[in-house]
Image (cartoon, helix red, strand yellow):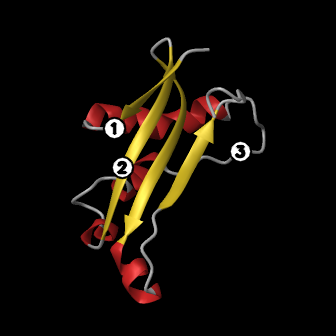
Amino acid sequence: MNVQIEKVQSDKQLRQFLKVPWQVYKNDPYWVPWLYHDRLYAFTKGKHPFFDHAEADFFIARHDGQPVGIIAAILNHRHNQFHEENVAHFGVFEVLNDPEAA
């Protein structure tokens, strides 16, 4: 599998990013999806208050143009200031059951 990593830079890409878990968990009878519009608000820079003190970049992994996974890189300045650290976090890691995509 040849996987390409794409940084989310548009509203269209953000919507694609947020829909990947539906693909990942489509056959999981125990998966409970979040409310899409709540998640859209939470991930929209300039709208959610988290981004007043933090930065994040979102990435989509694609195979043959189709999304196969997502991840976020997060830099929370308030966390770093409080803990006197200089760290970033990864989150929102959702990927198809494929080691190369992961």
**Image coords of residue 66 (percent x, y):** 49, 18
Q: Secondary structure at mark 1?
A: loop
Q: Secondary structure at mark 3?
A: loop
Quick one: label 3, few (<14), some, or many (20+) residues within 10 Å? Answer: few
Kindly report the distance in space between the C-alpha atoms of the residues bearing marks 3 and 2.
Answer: 25 Å
| Mark closer to the observer (3, 1) | 1
**Image coords of residue 85 (percent x, y):** 45, 79
Q: Quadrant of residue 60?
A: top left
Image side of residue 9 versus residue 65, left or right: left
Amino acid type shown at disc 1: Val
In primary-sequence order, the first of circles 2 and 1 is: 1
Quick one: label 2, few (<14), some, or many (20+) residues within 10 Å? Answer: some
Q: Secondary structure at mark 2?
A: strand
Mark drawn on residue 31: 3
Q: Nearer the viewer, residue 29 or 11?
A: 11
Kindly report the distance in space between the C-alpha atoms of the residues bearing marks 2 and 1.
Answer: 7 Å
Most extreme residue toward the left is 46
In primary-sequence order, the first of circles 3 and 1 is: 1
* Residue pointed to by mark 1: 8
Which residue shows up at 68% across the image and 35% down it?
Answer: 25
Amino acid type shown at disc 3: Trp
Which residue shows up at 74% across the image and 29% down it?
Answer: 27
Q: Are marks 2 and 1 in contact (CB under 8 Å)?
A: yes
Most extreme residue toward the right is 29
Amino acid type shown at disc 2: Asp
Image side of residue 61 versus residue 49, left or right: right
The answer to whether residue 2 is above or below residue 97 is: above
Most extreme residue toward the top is 64
**Image coords of residue 22 (percent x, y):** 58, 34
Mark drawn on residue 57: 2
